[in-house]
Amino acid sequence: MQRAVVTLLEWLFVLSLLAIVFGSFRNLLGDNFDLMQRAEALACRDEPAGCAVEEMRHERSFYAQTYDFRTHRRRNVHVSCLRDMILIGEYACTVQVPYVLNALPSAAPSGPRAPASSAHSGAVRRLPGRPPSP
């Protein structure tokens, strides 16, 4: 009787390890087209209609997927999608938007602008010790 219980526990342990490995591979190699569309929609949530995104980075792990997108107004929109229960359950996505590219200033400066100095006239800065590129 005691030997049967030990054997049963060993098999349950092996089966649970196999389930964890299968779930991990499913998260890493499974189809994620729907999740990617949800992430793109979240990246465009504050954009005007017809928003287009460019995928900059995509990272998959056994429990999460993260995306970095570029939109018309934002240089980097980071979308992180985590499963509810590590290996199983639906993905819940959150968005982090660090800054807006084409944001209008809150108040326009008044008075004439000072002329730009030669150091900041838009010329390309060269690193010291490097020859200029052709």
Image (cartoon, rainbow, N blue to C red):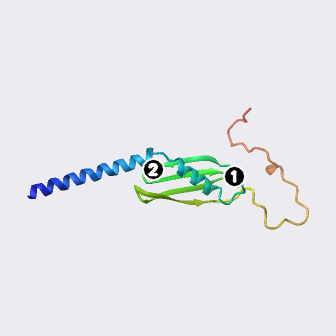
Q: Nearer the viewer, mark 2 or mark 1?
A: 1
Q: Residue at left 21%, top 51%? A: 11
**Residue 1 is drawn in which quadrant?**
bottom left
Residue 133's spot in the image, x, y percent?
72, 34
Residue for badge 1: 51
Inspect the image, locate mark 1, and give the three-letter code of the amino acid beneath it: Cys
> In front here: 74 or 24?
24
State the image coordinates of residue 110 (x, y, percent, origin top left). 88, 66
Estimate the spatial distance between the alpha carbons at disc 2 and disc 1, rounded to whole Å: 28 Å
Q: Label 2: which residue?
A: 61
**Relative horizontal placement of residue 125, taking residue 69 as reference (left or right):** right
The amino acid type of the residue labelled 2 equals Ser
Where is residue 75 drawn, in percent x and y?
67, 52
Q: Position of residue 14 (x, y in %)?
A: 24, 50
| Front in this rendered view, residue 94 or 97 | 94
User: Is 43 displayed left or right of 23 in the figure?
Assistant: right
Q: Residues within 10 Å of mark 1 (few under 14, many from 20)?
A: some
Helix, strand or loop under label 1? loop
N-term mark: 2 or 1: 1
Q: Which residue lies at the image location 56% right of the left edge and 51% below the top edge?
A: 67
In the displayed orientation, state which residue is furthest to the top. Answer: 134
Label drawn at residue 105 = none
Helix, strand or loop for disc 2: loop
Q: Quadrant of the C terminus?
A: top right
Could you say which is closer to the camera, residue 52 or residue 79?
A: 52
